[in-house]
Amino acid sequence: MKKWGILLCALAGSAHAADDALTATVAKLDTEMFSAFNSCDKPGQLDKYASYFDHDIEFYHDNGGVTWKRDVMIAQTAKNVCGKYRRELVPGSLKVVPVKDFGAIATGSHTFCQFGSNKCEGIAEFTLIWRLRDGVWQVTRALSYGHRANP
């Protein structure tokens, strides 16, 4: 019986370490992706941002509707975001859950800050479905919802 307890503790520790590693990976991807988003008015950054998304991305935005293709989503980002505002992850809000044989689900909250005034007046929730294929992580589904004034 004692051996089973030791084995279960070892397995739980191993799973926890794997979850920590996955969370660190997704947190790094989030930082890199939104660094490109936040500077998408600079040469090459919009293309870098686009590379984090599958060609057939499904992007659901409660105020903007649904976008079914990466090219359309990136064109909307260029028109509505670049040089106007930046996204900031709310500290401590990122949660990452593994998806067996696929990747991960990331959820959290983010604020949007205007470049001119530096005011962060908007906040929303997000869900990103990350797929790992051939060593490359990409978002296949994205949801941005619950947009409201930032208190």
Image (cartoon, rainbow, N blue to C red):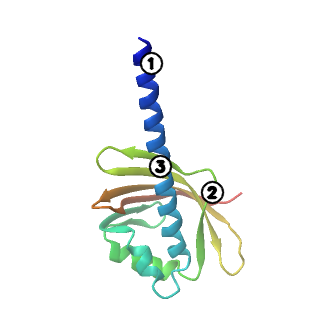
* Residues under numbered marks 1 and 2 in contact, where contact means CB atoms less than 8 Å apart: no
The mark found on residue 16 in the picture is none
Q: Please state which of the two labelled residues, at mark 2 or mark 3, is closer to the viewer.
A: 3
Label 2 belongs to which residue?
Answer: 90
Amino acid type at circle 3 is: Ala
Marks 1 and 3 sit apart, C-alpha to C-alpha, by 24 Å
User: Which residue is depicted at the point 43% across and 37% down?
Assistant: 15
Q: Quadrant of the N terminus?
A: top left
Q: Amino acid at mark 1?
A: Gly
Which residue position is annotated with label 1?
5
Q: Are marks 2 and 3 in contact (CB under 8 Å)?
A: no
Q: Quadrant of residue 90?
A: bottom right
Report, in whole angstroms, how far the alpha carbon at label 1 lies from the one at label 2.
38 Å
How far across and how far down the image is residue 74, in percent?
40, 77
**Residue at the limit of the structure toward the top, as seen here:** 1
**SS at badge 3:** helix
Q: Which residue is mark 3?
A: 21
Relative vertical location of residue 111 with respect to residue 80 in this rendering, above or below: above
